[in-house]
Image (tube, helix red, strand yellow):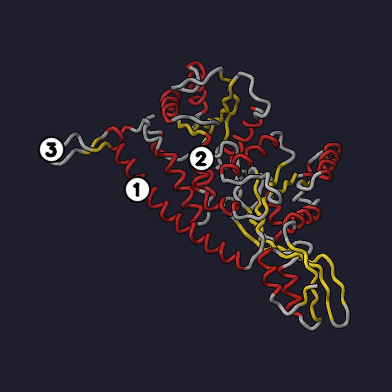
């Protein structure tokens, strides 16, 4: 095991053993199904191209403080790993630095816990400079706590000057100091990113268009919906964390109201604290949104638990989904739901104004979704009756671009419109060469 850690990150094609530990004692009804958790862990492992040789759930009466698993389990895993030439063991759950070190010594194989695995995926997927900085910051914050490992070089010390001083600085202390220095530099660079985003937001507020942010559990179909609505080609596959870097596009709602649609990074249960902190600059787009659209995979066995996970992240960002006009829920992937279940879902959607059923793949329910978005966006806008001279095409065009036209009547000399305007645009229209009725 002395050389295992020096290999660094798992490599594409490495053989993996995936374990999902869970407690035997009865869990709350809201807890996740262990088999569904294991399936998600396998998907996460496959997302960085590891070859899953074997996977299983592991029932624990109580986790061992030093090794998580009991000696019998560790002995069995050590034999299996040796026989099958396993390169990495993925443990779907939190593993302390001490537990990780002890398990690796016992089974003679590299161990990656859930947080480490998610960080590996993010590191592999980040495309923009901002995304790379955020992932590196999260990775260093995570690694800093794991320098107490079985690396033999960490026991070396660098001596003090002359005959004064003690034994000097250990390699462990040097590594920690280097990491701390790098973290400080990354935070400074990300502060620049935040200032740039603030500048972009201030420019958007001058336009101004309402912002609609798509959020949801990873692989719920946000990017597929985004592509359908915007005719874009954002990377979208049946893959966890297909999208990391936020994308924004302008779309027009049915009544003509323009909005900015934002596709954000997918959430996941037990999303590492380091990632939420590092990606705050990205997730702050959600904080600025006029409407948060929560896209759910209604076919997933743990869809209700996933919903609570998303709520948990939104709450940590300071977003209250109970605010009026802030939240809209989309039950996606209706095309994969059995007919009897579809009827129940659609009946529930009919009873609620903040819920819509949809298939982002087939397009079913998209028109109803856009109508609900428009209702939510315009609910706090001011309704005006505006009379525009027929020859004033510029004013008429501006009203259609910046308001939501509900009704129109034309005469030879005038066009009369019933329009909803935001507070910002209300002040602008009053100054235009039009008549407010």
User: Where does label 3 land, which residue?
Assistant: 164
Instruction: Give the mark nearest the N terminus, 3 or 2.
Output: 3
User: Where does label 1 land, which residue?
Assistant: 181
Q: Are marks 2 and 1 in contact (CB under 8 Å)?
A: no
Q: CA distance from mark 3 to mark 2?
A: 42 Å
Q: Residue at x 78, y 67 (%)?
A: 384
Counting other residues with Cα less than 10 Å from the Cα at mark 2, is it few (<14), some (14-19), or many (20 or more)? some
User: Where does label 2 land, which residue?
Assistant: 273
Q: Secondary structure at mark 2?
A: helix
Q: Residue at x 73, y 65 (%)?
A: 421
Name the quadrant containing residue 414. bottom right
Q: How far from the left and from the top, in percent, is residue 392?
A: 76, 81
Counting other residues with Cα less than 10 Å from the Cα at mark 3, is it few (<14), some (14-19), or many (20 or more)? few
Q: Nearer the viewer, residue 244 or 192?
A: 192
Q: Quadrant of the N terminus?
A: top left
Q: Is residue 35 visible?
A: no
Compared across the picture, whether 295 is left or right of 175 comes to right
User: With respect to residue 389, does 90 lie above or below?
Assistant: above
Q: Quadrant of the C terminus?
A: bottom right
Q: Secondary structure at mark 3?
A: loop
User: With respect to residue 339, does 181 lie above or below?
Assistant: below
Q: Is residue 411 visible?
A: yes
Q: Nearer the viewer, residue 195 or 432?
A: 432
Compared across the picture, whether 56 is left or right of 360 comes to left
Counting other residues with Cα less than 10 Å from the Cα at mark 1, is it few (<14), some (14-19), or many (20 or more)? few
Q: CA distance from mark 1 to mark 3?
A: 27 Å
Instruction: Give the mark nearest the N terminus, 2 or 1.
Output: 1
Q: How far from the left and from the top, in percent, is residue 407?
A: 84, 67
């Amino acid at each position: 095991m002395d050389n295992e850690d020096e290999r660094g990150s798992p490599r594409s094609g490495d053989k993996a053993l995936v374990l999902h530990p869970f407690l035997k004692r009865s869990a709350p009804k809201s807890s996740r199904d262990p088999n569904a958790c294991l399936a998600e862990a396998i998907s996460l492992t496959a997302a960085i191209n590891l070859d899953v040789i074997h996977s299983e759930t592991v029932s624990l009466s109580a986790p061992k403080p030093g090794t998580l698993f009991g000696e019998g389990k560790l002995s069995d895993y050590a034999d299996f790993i040796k026989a099958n030439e396993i390169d990495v063991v993925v443990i779907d759950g939190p593993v302390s630095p001490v537990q990780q070190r002890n398990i690796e010594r016992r089974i003679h194989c590299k161990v990656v816990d859930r947080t480490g695995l998610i960080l590996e995926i993010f590191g592999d997927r980040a495309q923009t400079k901002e995304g790379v900085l955020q992932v590196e910051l999260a990775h260093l914050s995570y690694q800093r706590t794991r320098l107490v490992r079985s690396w033999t070089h960490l026991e070396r010390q660098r001596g003090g000057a002359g005959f004064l001083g003690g034994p000097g600085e250990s390699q462990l202390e040097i590594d920690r100091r280097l990491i701390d220095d790098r973290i400080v530099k990354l935070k400074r660079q990300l502060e620049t990113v935040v200032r740039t985003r603030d500048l972009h937001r201030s420019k958007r507020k001058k336009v101004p268009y309402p912002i609609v942010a798509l959020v949801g559990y990873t692989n719920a179909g946000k990017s597929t919906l985004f592509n359908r609505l915007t005719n874009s080609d954002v990377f979208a596959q049946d893959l966890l964390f297909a999208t990391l870097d936020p994308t924004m596009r302008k779309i027009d709602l049915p009544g003509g109201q323009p909005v900015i649609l934002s596709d954000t990074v997918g959430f996941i249960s037990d999303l590492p604290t380091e990632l939420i902190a590092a990606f705050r600059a990205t997730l702050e787009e959600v904080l600025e949104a006029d409407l948060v659209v929560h896209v759910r995979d209604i076919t997933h066995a743990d869809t209700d638990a996933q919903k609570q996970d998303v709520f948990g992240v939104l709450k940590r960002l300071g977003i209250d989904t109970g605010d009026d006009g802030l939240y809209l829920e989309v039950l996606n992937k209706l095309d994969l739901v059995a007919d009897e279940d579809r009827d129940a879902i659609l009946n529930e959607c009919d009873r609620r104004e903040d819920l819509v059923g949809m298939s982002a793949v087939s397009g079913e329910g998209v028109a109803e979704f856009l109508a609900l978005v428009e209702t939510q966006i315009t609910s706090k806008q001011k309704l005006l009756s505006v009379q525009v001279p027929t020859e004033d095409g510029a004013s008429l065009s501006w009203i259609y671009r910046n308001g939501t036209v509900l009704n129109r009547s034309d005469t030879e000399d005038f066009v009369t419109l019933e329009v909803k305007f935001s507070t910002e645009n209300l002040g602008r229209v009053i100054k235009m060469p039009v008549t407010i009725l």
